[in-house]
Amino acid sequence: MNLENTLRYHFAKSTLISDSPRATASDSLTGTDIMAAMGMTQERAAMGYSAFLGKMGISQNDRERAIELLAEYALTKCDEVAALRKLDPAVKPLVMHQLAAFAFEDYSRSAASTRKCDCCDGEGFIEADVFTMKSHYTMRLPQWAKDLKQSPGDFEVKRQVKEVVRVLCTACKGKKVVSCACNDCHGRGKAVNQELTEKQGVPVLSDCKRCGGRGYERIPSTEAYAAVCQITDAISVATWEKSVKRFYDQLITKFDIEEAWAESQLNAITR
């Protein structure tokens, strides 16, 4: 059994009523066996199992637990980086927690993920300047104008007025969120290679150059750096690019390693 097979046990199922008895010599696992296996897996691979459940949206508590466990792990490894080792002891846990939170967001992102629209800041509407044609009459229509059969429009004064109005956001179409899927391959990870297609005369698919075949855009590391700068200014841009960014990437990879370890433990338990 792998981790994805355990997801269906987190949702309510209808009761199956049948008069056929259960096989006494069946090797299949019961629901109780599955629950016990999941508990043992969570005990042996706490970070990987919690990270997986948090990534799949099963539990907010597991998401927070995975971030806390990674932050604790980061505190044990951050002294290997000189820039992080020099941080104030009161600031260091906050920085590690911030890096762990961004590492989890990057780890859990997929082509089906959504993020807050940057254009409207998640409001669905934006303010735009529009020019509206206004008109007014300088006076009431005099009698001589009526005798000449003139209309009120002949005495109308028109002017353009600049107004600020709320219009629907063109980026998210009012949904307040946008997809994280790659704009070129639309989440498939494959795109048409124009050069090979022209040579061979048939469509040739290759890994998308924009996303590297992932199908989605990763969170820029500059966002994590900007969040760290809100806590401390002891890390410069050059230091971030030289050493801290590598440490941040290792935290993201740590989630993948722990998830693989959790799956191997679950396979061993349910074998």
Image (spheres, helix red, strand yellow):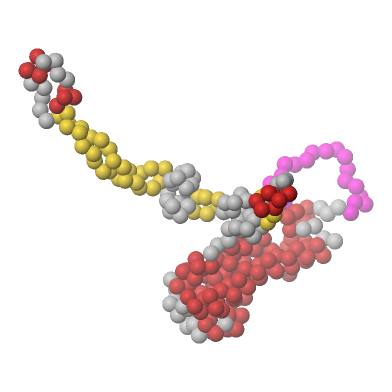
Tell which of 4 and 183 is nearer to you: 183
The reply to whether the magenta stretch includes residue 20 is: yes
- Point 11% across, 15% down: residue: 148
Q: Is residue 98 above or below residue 28?
A: below
Quadrant of the drawing holding the C terminus: bottom right
Residue 62, position as x, y percentages in the image: 62, 62
Task: Find residue 110 and report its horizontal and vertical position in percent.
Answer: 62, 56
Q: Is residue 60 above or below residue 124?
A: below
Say above or below: 16 vs 45.
above
Residue 214, by quadrant, is bottom right
- Asked if one can make out residue 62 in the rendered structure from this viewpoint, the answer is no
Closer to the camera in the image, 17 or 260: 260
Rendered image quadrant of residue 210: bottom right
Residue 233 lies left or right of residue 140; in this view the side is right
In this orientation, which residue lies closer to the viewer: 170 or 197?
197
Residue 111: in magenta span: no
Magenta stretch prevailing secondary structure: loop
- Please state, as top left, top right, bottom left or bottom right, where the N terminus lies in the image: bottom right
Residue 82 picture location, percent across and down: 55, 85
Q: How many marks?
A: 0
Q: Give the farthest residue toward the right.
A: 25
From where the camera sits, is residue 241 visible?
yes
| Residue stretch in magenta | 8-27
Residue 159 in the image, given as x and y percentages of width and height: 21, 37
* Residue in view at x 49 percent, y 54 percent: 116
Query: Does 151 sit above or below residue 57?
Result: above
